[in-house]
Amino acid sequence: MRILVIGDIVGRPGRTAVRDRVQDLREQYQADLIVANVENLAGGYSVTPPLVEELLAAGVDVMTSGNHIFDKREAIDYIAQQPRLLRPANYPPGTPGRGIWTGEIKGTPVAVINLIGRVFMGPADDPFRAADAILHELDQTIRVRLIDFHAEATSEKCALGWYLDGRASAVFGTHTHVQTADERILPHGTAYITDIGMTGSHAGVIGMDRDDVIARFLTVTHRRMENAKGDVRICGIALDIDETTGRAREITRLALRHEP
């Protein structure tokens, strides 16, 4: 099974690039499943129902998120109704939405799991224990298991990768918007990368206008940050997973320039 994972889509530049290229990328990488992190979809903060539906219609199959998912009020009711939009599974009980999607892709059962870190992040339950519980309860016929770990600290991400080696097909980090160059397959068959990077404008600071961000460091009179423009890239990974064992055969890091 071939899987394409797209890193944090930031604002209009990122979502336009994905909308325009997703079908070409599916064909180019022969992707059976496309997963994208969308917590920054709407101007850099959260999602709106029309924008999610637009990308689902364009060809994204499953969407993960993170700490910004509930920044917009309309996301709260919508996520409870849209099973293909996930929020971190280790958020407190009673949080709207789901932290796991399961389905069948060309006859192969697949699970996509969304977790969030605790180091330098907001309140959440232990992602290690949450992963244990989810994998314990998961139908054991589902061998292809993908985990988006939305976390700040590289150490926490790396530790979870090792902790789940052999129990997940892939553990990939999101959130920092800076792609790391440590993609590898761990000894027991789990594909791992600390951060798959950001899809959006790389002409600013993690997707936002550089002058707006610099002003936040230099002054106390903050102004609302806008999306950066130009140098748009689609970042992520391409995975090749053995459908029978769930072990990863290959992980390839992607950073593709997009010309509108």
Image (tube, rainbow, N blue to C red):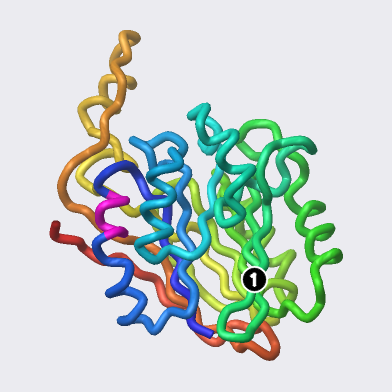
Q: How many labels does the image show?
A: 1
Q: Main secondary structure of the magenta part?
A: helix
Depth order, front residue of 133/215:
133
Residue at the top extreme, as displayed: 221
Dot 1 surroundings within 10 Å: few (below 14), some, or many (20 or more)? few
Depth order, front residue of 55/133:
55
Placement of 90 over or under 220, stated as above or below: below
User: What residue do we see at 73% from left, 77% from top?
Assistant: 142
Q: Where does the image place residue 176, in percent across and percent down from the top left?
A: 45, 46
The quadrant the N terminus occupies is bottom right
Where disc 1 sits, the SS reads strand
Where is residue 21, by image quadrant? bottom left
Q: Where does the image place residue 225, in percent across and percent down from the top left?
A: 30, 26
The quadrant the C terminus occupies is bottom left
Q: Where does the image place residue 86, in percent across and percent down from the top left?
A: 60, 51
Q: Where does the image place residue 99, in percent across and percent down from the top left?
A: 67, 51
User: What residue do we see at 39% from left, 60% from top?
Assistant: 57
Placement of 219 over or under 127, stated as above or below: above
User: What residue do we see at 63% from left, 54% from top?
Assistant: 114
User: What residue do we see at 81% from left, 73% from top?
Assistant: 139
Placement of 137 over or under 123, stated as above or below: below
Reading the image, the residue beneath label 1 is 103
Depth order, front residue of 194/99:
99
Magenta span of residues: 14-19
Image side of residue 204 versus residue 158, left or right: left
Image side of residue 28 versus residue 99, left or right: left
Identify which amino acid the numbered label 1 is placed on.
Gly
Image side of residue 215 versus residue 35, left or right: left
Where is residue 30, by image quadrant? bottom left
Residue 193 belongs to magenta span: no
Image side of residue 70 versus residue 5, left or right: right
